[in-house]
Amino acid sequence: MTMTMWVPTQLAMLINHPGAKKYNVSTLNKIWYGSSPISPTVLEGSMDLFKAGFYQWYGQTETGMVSVLRPEDHQERSQCTGREMFNADLRVVDEEGNDTPVGEVGEIICAQEPLGMIGYYKMDEANKRVIRDGWIHTADLARAEGEGYFTIVDRLTDMIISGAENIYPKEIEDVIGSHPGVREVAVFGIPDKIYGEAVCAVVVKKEGHSLDQEVIINFCASKLAGYKKPKRVEFMEDLPKNPSGKVTKNVLRDPYWADRKKRV
């Protein structure tokens, strides 16, 4: 039995490799993936290329691995993140700490026992913010799906508030990522004089495709509510990433807010 653990960025690179289908990958039986959200396009392409059992895991350094989406779950719930493992205790809660009803979005919190951290070393303020009443607040936003399943929609710190509307970048990234000419995309908020924040998308084009801002905005307009479509689209050769393959959105976002004392 052969298995591996990859982050979505690695899967995207593999399925977009021009010679991907010429190799025999039949000995790969299990693929664990996680660490960052995966787009429907990348997951579909990965499952088509690798005829393996796919396991999505979720967790943080603070919590350990606390949920899994099993291969059988991928048949009907491939866009879910998973459900808690047998030795973990997860909740999706609103700002008052109440469990959110099915279909609503809240923050994932994880019981500190038995898997979670003791605390940050010599960081009392951070500990008070993250650990409350025995629960670790992850700052990950998720939608409760019922039967214990949940779907991460974004990071609390990445959510865009535009004209009092909450906008989750991952939803827009999934739409833009489904365009046949897009290899990678990152969406984040930039300053807007009227609405506070506006949606900005940075796109990496696939080789041989010609795209411009208007094409991307019109593509989003056909699939998303008007207030969710980008107001600005930039193009780059590659997105900045940290050593684990996660896109470092702060590198993209910070220059737009550099002259602001407060981000609203």
Image (cartoon, grey):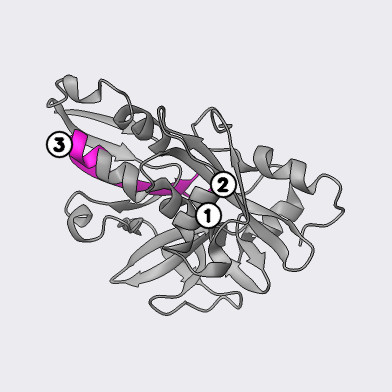
Give the distance between the C-alpha atoms of the residues marked 1 and 2, in whole angstroms. 6 Å
Residue nearest the observer in this picture, 222 or 8: 222
Tell me what residue is drawn at x 74 percent, y 47 percent: 123
Residue annotated with mark 2: 213
Of the image marks 3 and 2, the number of the one nearer the N terminus = 3
- Horizontal side, residue 233 vs residue 178: left or right: right
Please check the rendered image and state whether residue 194 is part of the magenta-colored stretch, yes or no: no
Please check the rendered image and state whether residue 64 is part of the magenta-colored stretch, yes or no: yes
The quarter of the rendered structure image containing the N terminus is: top left
Q: Residue 39 appears at what percent x and percent y?
A: 38, 48
Q: Amino acid at mark 1?
A: Ile
Is 218 situated above or below 35? below
- Horizontal side, residue 166 vs residue 251: left or right: left
Q: Amino acid at mark 2?
A: Gln
Q: Secondary structure at mark 3?
A: loop
Q: Let me know if residue 108 appears in the view.
A: yes
Mark 3, mark 2: which one is toward the viewer? Answer: 2
Q: Residue 162 appears at what percent x and percent y?
A: 66, 67
Give the distance between the C-alpha atoms of the residues marked 3 and 2, in whole angstroms. 36 Å
Q: Residue 104 appears at what percent x and percent y?
A: 45, 75
Q: Are marks 1 and 2 in contact (CB under 8 Å)?
A: yes
Q: Secondary structure at mark 2?
A: helix
Instruction: State which region is magenta.
Output: 46-65
Residue annotated with mark 1: 217
The quarter of the rendered structure image containing the C terminus is: bottom right
Residue annotated with mark 3: 51
Of the image marks 3 and 1, the number of the one nearer the N terminus = 3
